Image (cartoon, rainbow, N blue to C red):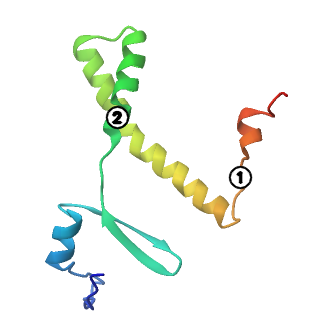
Amino acid sequence: MLKKRISVSRKRQITIPIEFCNKLGIEKEVECFLQNDAIIIRPVQERSGDFDEQILEDLISQGFSGNQLLEKFKEMRRQIRPAVECLLAEARLAADGQARFSTYEDVFGAEDD
């Protein structure tokens, strides 16, 4: 396990050791969050490409094509990350008992036997 003690500047900034960056593939951006009294810093992994095919299928089925298709695709793709971040925030609140949560049955209904 890599472990290193690093200082925090007056502006609350830190420098991530180069060997950590190299090992994790950190380039321009990291995401940071609190978990169990610890600060977790990890590389941002853009994965919106997972939805590209579904977005395109939906837009084509709506009759978009050419430049209009491209612009709508870009617009929808930009909305993925904020939507997922909102879902995660809601899940964290529910996990901490600070918000209502839905069960499988709430979402999909009771299974008929």
User: Reading the chain from its start, which is encountered first: label 2 or label 1?
Assistant: 2
- Which image quadrant: the C terminus? top right
Q: From what the image shows, is residue 54 above or below residue 28? A: above
Taking the image as shown, residue 8 lies to the left or right of residue 87, namely: left
Q: Position of residue 87 (x, y in %)?
A: 54, 49
Crowd rating for badge 1 (residues with CA inside 10 Å; few <14, some 14–19, many 20+) = few
Q: Position of residue 13 (x, y in %)?
A: 26, 81
Residue receiving disc 1? 101
Q: Position of residue 32 (x, y in %)?
A: 37, 68
C-alpha span from label 2 to label 1: 27 Å
Residue at horizontal 47 percent and vertical 73 percent from the top: 34
Q: Position of residue 89 (x, y in %)?
A: 54, 57
SS under mark 2: helix
- Which image quadrant: the N terminus? bottom left
What's under tag 2, amino acid-wise? Arg
Q: Quadrant of residue 30?
A: bottom left
What's under tag 1, amino acid-wise? Phe
Q: From what the image shows, is residue 4 above or below residue 50? A: below
Residue receiving disc 2? 77
Residue furthest out toward the right: 113
What numbered label is drawn on residue 19?
Answer: none
